[in-house]
Image (spheres, grey):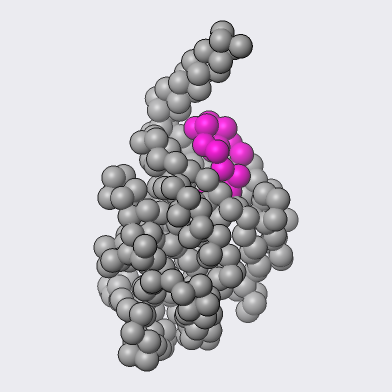
Amino acid sequence: MKVSIVVPFHNEEKIVELTINKLIKVMKRGDYDYEIIPIDDNSNDNTGILLDNLSKKHKRVRSMHIKNNTPGPSGLGTALKFGFKQCSGDVIITFMGDLSDNPNDIPKFIKKVSSNFDVVCGSRFIKGGKVIGYPKIKLICNRIYNLLFSFLFCIPTNDISNGFKAYKKTVLHAIEPTSKGFEMTSEIVLKAHIKNFRITEVPVSWHEREDDTESKFGSFISPSFIFFKLPKIGFSYLELSLKLWFKFLFKFLRQIKYE
């Protein structure tokens, strides 16, 4: 089983080498067949140059670049989809380039996929998970969103908005994600759930960026998301939500009948 790790970067020259080197260290320690695909998403600093140098130095690192005339990143969803197309692995892991996630959690994902799960979500809010330096208001919004989303669509996850996930390549081929922003982290899991792929979660640790700045890809739990994108997702999948709930209710009633 080959593992592809897709890592988006935008103007992260201060942390690029540290992130890639930590990922290499973890993968070497586990003796995995792997590749690391860092994505330079329209950076205007030395991020792209540093990634190319790392790619020359390490044969398992393949740097890719998104370049356009619009200032800023193209969006996490766009960067990840670009990276997915470059992957040769059977399993694809998405990892945030700012090192807010812990590379040492990666073996947990690989173990779960090896146990025949199709999608593995990293969860900061289950036993064994950890959150350090998460702003309280953002944390409250996060928990409301995650609980609401999981409840509406009967998805067995506690942290669907976390970008740290693993997917079998067959899942991504089957669902064709379309989101351009951070909401794609939820879209993939929702569509995988619709198609009855096996979904589970593993505890992960997360800490605020060490340089105390916002993620270059923005925040998933933002006012624009809450007031515009979330209602749009809700209305788009309203019929689906009802179908999933009727399906859940039907199974529940059948269990009661036979007990």
- Quadrant where the C terminus is found in the figure: top right
Q: Which residues are magenta?
A: 147-160
Residue 80, horizontal then vertical, whole percent: 37, 62
> Residue 179, can we see it?
yes
Residue 148 quadrant? top right
State whether residue 257 is above or below residue 43. Answer: above
State whether residue 211 is above or below residue 189. Answer: below
Residue 138, horizontal then vertical, whole percent: 65, 54
State whether residue 252 is above or below residue 211. Answer: above
Taking the spot 45% from the left edge, 21% from the top edge, the residue there is 247
Residue 33, horizontal then vertical, whole percent: 38, 71
- Quadrant where the N terminus is found in the figure: bottom left
Taking the spot 37% from the left edge, 53% from the top edge, the residue there is 168
**Nearest the camera: 249 or 59?**
59
Residue 224, horizontal then vertical, whole percent: 50, 50
Q: Is residue 229 magenta?
A: no
> Residue 219, can we see it?
no
Taking the spot 51% from the left edge, 53% from the top edge, the residue there is 112
**Nearest the camera: 127 or 222?**
127
In the displayed structure image, the side of residue 55 where residue 148 appears, left or right? right
